[in-house]
Image (spheres, helix red, strand yellow):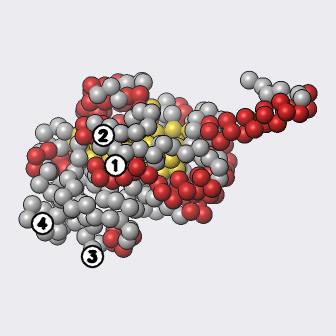
Amino acid sequence: MGIAHSHNLPGNWAATLCATVAALWLIMGSSGAHAFDLQGHRGARGLMPENTLAGFSHALTLGVTTLEMDLGVSKDGHIVISHDSVLTPALTRDPDGKWLQAPGPAINDLSREELQAYDVGRLNPESKNARRFPNQQPVDGERIPTLAQVLALSPRSGSGPVRLNIETKLNPLQPHLAPPPEEFARLLVDQLRGAGATGRVTVQSFDWRTLQQVQSLAPELKTAYLTAEQRWLDNVQTGQAGVSPWTAGMDVDDFGGSIPRLIKQAGGDIWSPYFGDLDEARLKEAQALGLRVIVWTVNDVADMHKLIELGVDGIISDYPDRLREVARQRGMALPEQREGG
């Protein structure tokens, strides 16, 4: 739809129209179709214990568009919130209150009840994570929550439930640590539909097999294709022989090395790259294909400004408070601040 030329309108109407268009642009975001997506990574990992109800509630209070989190499956089939497929010493105390001395046991080797015995409300002060997130406030007694508990978080202010961006944690190189993609997707879809939550959820993953399964089972769910092209993780493997085990049998080299074209062909809604892998040409290519581009995990204020200026559709951050302040400084529309309970 076109906009009338302002020089053909009376002065006051022209001014009003220009102001209205500017306001709409800020509200709708750089893509011109959606609001900027301000996502709290694992709740608000820089500020509160990650992937906990306390962390999610704090992120709601700060004001985010979306709560980002990670999913595992317990031995008895409950979907739980955990980034790591095994209990990690950096943030886990055993039933006796002692820090784990080694990784494990695996999430899928423990029942939901057994998982509840572990405290994940504080960082081990000897860990790298404690040095990385010195401002994280402990909440002793926090347990690994279930997805059902997170879905039941009811904001006590605001116009409605916050969106969720939920990551299926699978590793095709360690298949024993999670259910098969088909089973994981079926459990997830059944739970989201049972809770009437499919309209406010995006499913994301580095292992695209689950995304393909989710799209087949529940076309109403949005999917975000996570990518990294780094030394520490390269799930796309551009220019390498054969097909990456992460990309559900699809080869990016069949698309001229274009990740956006591959994701579009795969049926994705969102490309979610590591922010250091993104440049303007790739961003514009993805958006021209109708994909939204939401980058992870951005914690430096200068990087936030740079990426918003570049035109990304959203940012995932351990510090949603910093990201919100950057958005405020730039005159962008801000998500509602809510009280989760």
Along the line of sight, the residue nearer the viewer: 39 or 339? 339
**Upstream in the sequence, badge 4 or badge 1?**
1
Q: CA distance from mark 4 to mark 3?
A: 15 Å
Q: Residues within 10 Å of mark 3 (few under 14, many from 20)?
A: few
Residue 158 in the figure: left or right of residue 289: left
Residue beneath the point at 58% across and 35% down: 34
Q: Residue at x 25, y 40 (%)?
A: 149
Circle 1/circle 2 CB separation < 8 Å: yes
**What x and y, as percent, mark residue 24?**
67, 36
Q: Nearest the camera: 252 or 324?
A: 324
Q: Residue at x 35, y 39 (%)?
A: 156
Q: State the separation of the CA atoms marked 2 and 3.
A: 32 Å
Quadrant housing the N terminus:
top right
The quadrant of the rendering that contains the C terminus is top left
> Depth-wise, is mark 4 or mark 1 nearer the camera?
1
Cα distance in 3D space between marks 4 and 1: 24 Å
Q: Which residue is mark 4?
A: 97
Q: Amino acid at mark 2?
A: Leu
How dense is the environment of label 2, judged by Cα within 10 Å: few (below 14), some, or many (20 and up)? some
Amino acid type assigned to the residue bearing label 1 in the image: Ser
**Nearer the camera: disc 1 or disc 3:** 1
Q: Secondary structure at mark 1?
A: helix
What residue is disc 2 on? 153
- Badge 4: few (under 14), some or many (20 or more) residues near its Cα, within 10 Å? few
Q: Which residue has dot 3 on it? A: 126
- The circle on residue 226 is none
* N-term mark: 4 or 3: 4
Dot 3 falls on a residue whose secondary structure is: loop
Picture quarter containing residue 121? Answer: bottom left
Q: What residue is pinned by disc 1?
A: 57
How many angstroms separate mark 1 from mark 2 (CA)?
A: 8 Å
